[in-house]
Amino acid sequence: EPEVTQTPSHQVTQMGQEVILRCVPISNHLYFYWYRQILGQKVEFLVSFYNNEISEKSEIFDDQFSVERPDGSNFTLKIRSTKLEDSAMYFCASSATGGSSPLHFGNGTRLTVT
Amino acid sequence: DQQVKQNSPSLSVQEGRISILNCDYTNSMFDYFLWYKKYPAEGPTFLISISSIKDKNEDGRFTVFLNKSAKHLSLHIVPSQPGDSAVYFCAASFLNYGGSQGNLIFGKGTKLSVKP
């Protein structure tokens, strides 16, 4: 079964550094998402992306965050200047269409900011 | 902000019996509900969903019930199997109110343990 793949599985970075989290969505999917889960807390929506632009974003997704689909297969999340509170598990997801098409999640990247 | 609540952090059930996982929500504008399952070191996996125009949806061993007046939904797994042991997340969205199914509001999850 096709999968959403995320790299790296674990990223350690120093506060203030830029970090890029990478995702390869399922190949025929059109909608892409980033979620995060801080340890012990809920999975939270960050952003959705369709047709090469952001379609929706949460309050968490401030100017420090950006997303990009640099080519036909990758989908990236960039955090410009990481803070300690950015430490979390970041999940990429994709869906075939919008509407009620279910989201398929990757296994996540654990980001640790020291 | 607790729009979607799963009040039981854990549930233990004997193999072969029914597992019932509960979820409450506060926002009556939610119109689409989903259950996801998550194993350690993996991402959430979609299980089953229900639109607010229905009160029941069934898929094999999994049935989701929606009680709109009580703002409550439940996931029934019968019979439960040891492989069902995982964390189960309830999620809701505003599908028909200008939102998308992709902006999901998750509960905190319930850890199900199915004992052989």
Image (cartoon, grey):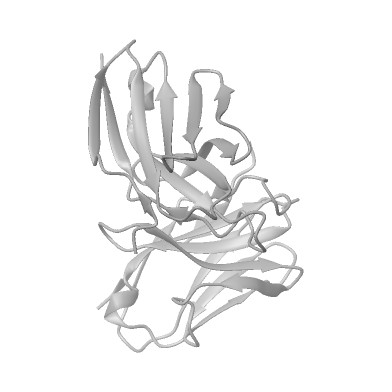
> Is residue A70 something that shows in the picture?
no
At which x and y percent is residue B84? Answer: 38, 26
User: Quadrant location of the C terminus of chain A?
Assistant: bottom left
**Image check: A72 left or right of A60?**
right
> Is residue A21 something that shows in the picture?
yes
Q: Is residue B18 above or below residue B113?
A: above
**Depth order, front residue of B50/A14:** B50
Q: Residue at x 55, y 30 (%)?
A: B55
Q: Residue at x 55, y 27 (%)?
A: B56
At which x and y percent is residue A45? Answer: 48, 63
* Direction front: furthest residue: B69
Which of the 4 image quadrants contains residue A42? bottom left
**Image check: A84 left or right of B65?**
left
Q: How many marks?
A: 0
At which x and y percent is residue A49? Answer: 66, 68
* Direction top: furthest residue: B16
**Depth order, front residue of B110/A67:** B110
Q: Is residue A5 above or below residue B1?
A: above
User: Quadrant location of the N terminus of chain A?
Assistant: top right
Q: Is residue A103 above or below residue B112?
A: below
Q: Residue at x 35, y 35 (%)?
A: B22
Q: Is residue B75 above or below residue A4?
A: above
**Depth order, front residue of B93/A84:** B93
At which x and y percent is residue A67? Answer: 59, 75
Q: Residue at x 54, y 52 (%)?
A: B30
